[in-house]
Amino acid sequence: MSFVKRNTVLSSPRAGLTPSAPQQQQPKQETQLAPGLRPSPTDGRLTTSTGTASLDQLLAGHGGLPLGTCLLVEEQGTTDFSGILLRYYAAEGLVQGHQVHAVAFPPEWRHQLPGLASPDKKSKSASPAPAPEEKMKIAWRYESLGNNANAGASTRGDSGAPFCHSFDLSKRLASSESKGTLNPISVGGAPSLDRKSVGTASPLKMILKQLRAKLESSGSSTIHRLVVPSLLSPTLYPPGCAQPSEVLQFLHGLRALLRLYSTQLTAIITFPTSLFPRSSGLVRWIEILCDGVVELIPLPARLGAAPPPPSGSDPKANEQPQGMFKVYTLPVYHEKGGGGAESGQFRENLSFSLSASKGLVIKPYSLPPMVEDEQEKPSAAPMKDGLDF
């Protein structure tokens, strides 16, 4: 009695047919991504860094700004924190080899971009762990507060190249570090009071025309970044640009270019809410036409406060919040909700701080823990009965 192995077919090869040799599976050739790109951990779409690692973690959980989208950064007051975000965004693009299109900036703006920071000699792993007694001095909810901003942060792409570089505001970007090209887009001459001249030549339409020409002339693997500073500000744009028919057509055209070149173009626009409040209907329409909307609210300066210390003197002093960071809208791309709804971090009260070495750091806002000082203050010198002359 013979035993036959199960799930085997006992058949002889047909006449004229020879058993084919086993086909060798050819290894799949992985497409190499352009520098500065990596797939999103959420849905796999390509993303690029804004130059600020803490801001990348807030953008809908993609770990960066998705290609084909724009981000509107609003700011109150007379500070220029949003302008610093634009510098990091442009510097990151030049280091990665992207084409950066700067609106209303001269070619000399390249020399104002921050330079690459020198690598730290001291590694974080070498720092000793805190003793258990020191952990009990503060509440448990403050213990992991510093890890929220860096949770899941990865500054390197799949190819091993840095995805988000570290910059130093005290340095300037050297020509050897810049691999991309900076294309300044002029808005026009001095603002004219003639209505006919304003109506015939629209500066905002010229911006879209020059940007479209650059996109069509470049290859499909070239990444472009658009920098639009202080939209509708009278110091940079003619007064005719503030008309709703002008600015809304510009944003509609920009949105069309972002969808047409959804694998090549990103944009960041700053907007002064002190000149155009969010309660106006025009600003509401501007926010609708942008994929993401965030706002920087600087804290008012205290009267009689000491000037800020240097960047290398006290690291704890540089981490003090300098303003509030509000997130109004973020893109929703998948059926899970997107927009950071999984973590809910953007729903918390966020704050930002700026330092020369770390740049703009966004983290949850909380009051500092009340810790009693163990060291007693030195007693004052005893008063003398008389005065010695």
Image: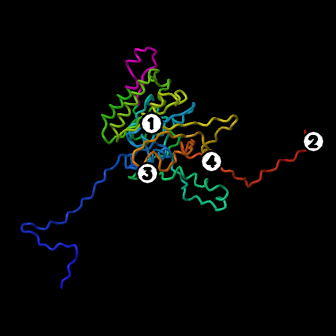
Q: Position of residue 242 (x, y in %)?
A: 46, 23
Mark carried by residue 268: 1
User: Mark 1 vs mark 2: which is more N-terminal?
Assistant: 1
Q: How is the image coloured?
A: rainbow
- Amino acid type, residue under disc 2 in the picture: Gly
User: Mark 1 vs mark 4: which is more N-terminal?
Assistant: 1
Q: Position of residue 223 (x, y in %)?
A: 36, 40
Q: CA distance from mark 2 to mark 4?
A: 44 Å
User: Mark 3 vs mark 1: which is more N-terminal?
Assistant: 3
* Residue wearing tag 4: 316
The quadrant holding residue 268 is: top left
User: Mark 4 vs mark 3: which is more N-terminal?
Assistant: 3
* Residue wearing tag 3: 156
Q: Which residues are magenta?
A: 184-205
Question: At 53% across and 49% down in the image, what residue appears?
Answer: 149
User: Mark 2 vs mark 4: which is more N-terminal?
Assistant: 4
Q: CA distance from mark 1 to mark 2?
A: 69 Å
In front of the other: label 3 or label 1?
A: 1
Question: Can residue 114 be spotted in the picture?
Answer: yes
SS at mark 4? helix
The quadrant holding residue 241 is: top left
